Image: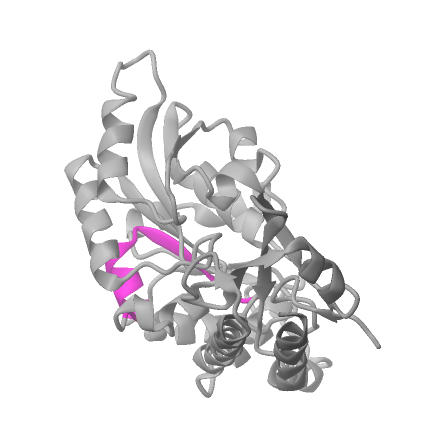
Amino acid sequence: MTTYSFLDDYSEGCHPEILDALQVSNLVQQTSYGNDDYTAEARRLIAEACGRPGMPVFLVASGTLANLIISAATLRPHEAIVSAASGHVALRETGAIEATGHKIISVPSDDGRITPAAVDDAVAGNAQAPHMAKPRLVYVSNATEFGTVYSRSELRALREACDRHDLLLMVDGARLGVALVSERSGGATLSDIASLADIFWIGGTKTGTLFGEAIVIPNAELAVDFEFHLKQRGALLAKGRALGVQFEALFSNDLFAQSAAVANGHAAALSDGITAAGFELAADTESNQVFAVLPNSVIESLQKSFAFYVWEPRPNDASVVRLVTSWATESTAVERMISTLAELA
């Protein structure tokens, strides 16, 4: 039996509607470097979805590119980023942010979310100017690395904390789609994100595109000369049309939200199956990442048929595993995982 992957939400290529759009547009000649008709339409659709027609939108190939370009473009050399200790920029980008010359101030977080109190503490703990890097930007990922989701009220409280300290608020939206369609979001929309964040990005890679993320800049001052940073960091693609076509398709016919809802639905089914089999969840499932505590013997048996991350060890010969679902997850694979767990319980 072929091993089925729950390792991540980008094991497949792209959504069939996006593949169709790439095929249809393939031989249509277009201007280079993102000045093509498809990118213009993608930008228009994204800005309108955010409730801000004409707002600056820039398309890049990857999330790490988005994070480091935003850092380099918005911060002066002595300014620092406040992030949860588990934040992607703090742990899993090989020092890309530090390589731009900016310090990351890590703050504790039990569930991946950063709180206004943590922002206050970070500012107070780095206030010996000019001997300490100056906090300037608060980084949050939504959904977080633990699959948790910020509610609209939590994001509003972070905005207020940033305003108290004259800080910028940035949202890493690698999984923004699944966050917004989550019940935990409290009905938050792209328009809410645009009204609360100074700069954020919308993940395409994990929502159905072959590759690509969309940097959105509600704070117009931050958009000045932004394209120079794209070029300098190698993010300005000659065939920028490839990004434009994909995001035009992703933001047509509600595909962005639909893909995210499918992913969350599969995760909810997995969670229900895990608990029905008598196993414990390490955290409530709020998006498309499921964290479960399983005996190591069960994990070894599951790995014969399924691929997933063993996240961290637990006492009594058990471990936390992470299962990730996507727009392309097969219902039959979810059912097979659930039935296998029931047999192993």
Location of residue 120 in the rendering, given as x and y in whole percent from the top left corner: 22, 33
Where does residue 143 sit, x and y in percent of width and height? 42, 59
Whether residue 186 appears in this view of the structure is yes
First to last magenta residue range: 188-205
Comparing 42 with 305, the one in front is 305
Residue 116: image quadrant is top left
Q: Residue at x 45, y 39 (%)?
A: 71
Residue 59: horizontal and vertical position, in percent? Answer: 52, 60
State whether residue 187 is above or below residue 193: below
Could you tell me if residue 248 is visible in this image? no
In the picture as drawn, the residue positioned furthest to the right comes out as 1
Residue 283 occupies which quadrant of the picture? Answer: bottom left
Tell me the quarter of the image containing the N terminus. bottom right
Horizontal arrangement in the rendering, residue 22 relative to residue 151 (left or right): right
Q: Quadrant of the C terminus?
A: bottom right
**Left or right of residue 27, residue 334 in this image:** left
Relative vertical location of residue 167 with respect to residue 169 in this rendering, above or below: above
Q: How is the image coloured?
A: one colour
Q: Is residue 176 magenta?
A: no
Question: Residue at the location (41% across, 71% down)?
Answer: 46
Relative to the observer, which residue lies in front, 233 or 198? 198
Residue at 82% across, 75% down: 2
Q: Residue at x 63, y 63 (%)?
A: 8
Q: Position of residue 202 (x, y in %)?
A: 45, 63
> With 248 as the anchor, is 301 left or right in this view?
right
